[in-house]
Amino acid sequence: MTIVDLIVIATILVSHLPAVVGTPGQSDGAYTEPFKRQLPTIRPGSPQSPWNTCEKSGGPYKLQDYYRGESFLNDWEFFSWADPTNGNVNYQTRANAIAKNLAYVKQDGTTVLAVDDFSNVPVGGRRDSVRINTKKRYNEGLFIADFWKMPYGCSLWPAYWSVGPNWPNGGEIDVLEGANLQKTNQYTLHTGPMCTASLGNVKVDARLIHTQCASYWWDNRGCGFSDSDERSYGKGFNDVGGGVFAHLWNRDGIKMWHFARSEIPADLKEERPNPATWVTPVAFWSSRTCDMGKNFYEHTLVIDTTICGDWAGATYSSSGCPGTCAEAVANKQNFKGAKWEINYIAVYQRNE
């Protein structure tokens, strides 16, 4: 083969390569428009994944939805009305949250949802924050949430949860929630009448603290469990690089697990979750004393951070925090680091 032949072949091969279109100065070749960065969504099985595993099929559950990076800004809705829990917050629209750098995606694909830590707010005023919820609604499933960091501290009330229509009748599932200087996570259900917490014959690691799930205006505690592991919430959670919260919701009941970063099961990393092989759940609510179909339906997933309000405000004086909750709102230094850093949230359904 002559040199001329080689040049001809090379020319043909180059002509068939895909064109790369980009904007000068952007090393990743990605086009960026206001309020919408076009970073790719990275799945656990992709080469860019921090786990660097191969996506595998099979297993008892199949992946339904996978939220990471930009999908939290585009496939979730920004709640921008008054806080239903009476918090000292101004929940921001999508455009405002991004413009104020309260919602953004880092280069590694981590999604950040932050509380305003730069504005001057009067004592008892309202500070900007973010609350988002899925556009999709869910009925049963296996839900996996991986967080690198979470907000915590005096006056703060962060939560990852799900809720149905016509609260409390559609139910509420609180997976990760706490207030002020709380050291461990609290897992709670809220429902309409005729639902109580019972374990049946299932062993759990957390302590049952209230059995009445029904929520009323005079008693909205719900039925909850208190974790004993300080890695499940706040500073202890952040110090170990965060971790995973998983909950399985089906006709038999609702089970929950917490895995510190170093203890995440291999099947989760391989995108083949099998709860039957996991360690003892931290919490369980049996369908024997709570009809799952009647009390939980059409749920949206929610992530938010409120300030003071019905829980953090009501317990502030007994929490060990200085001054008053109203004064804490005005102290912008109090909110340095008050942010969610989200790796991903995945929803699985039974592989029939």
Image (cartoon, grey):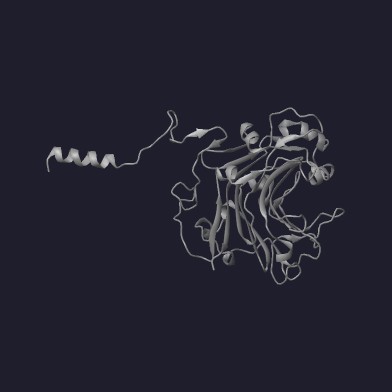
Q: Is residue 100 left or right of residue 3?
A: right
Which residue is more in the foreground, 289 or 263? 289
Please say if 211 is above or below 26: below
Instruction: Tell me residue 222's x, y (percent).
Output: 79, 57
Q: Is residue 245 visible?
A: yes
265 vs 83, left or right, is left
Q: Quadrant of residue 85?
A: top right
Can you name the residue that lies furthest to the left here?
2
Residue at the spot x=28%, y=39% of the render? 15
Residue 240 x %, y %: 61, 47
Q: Is residue 162 left or right of residue 308?
A: left
- In the rendered view, does 317 fall on the left or right side of 203? right
Q: How many marks?
A: 0
Give coordinates of residue 343: x percent, y percent.
57, 47
* 120 to 111, vertically: above or below: above
Can residue 319 be seen at all in this image of the molecule?
no
The x and y percentages for residue 278 are 59, 63
Which quarter of the rendering shows the C terminus?
bottom right
Q: Residue at x 61, y 63 (%)?
A: 279
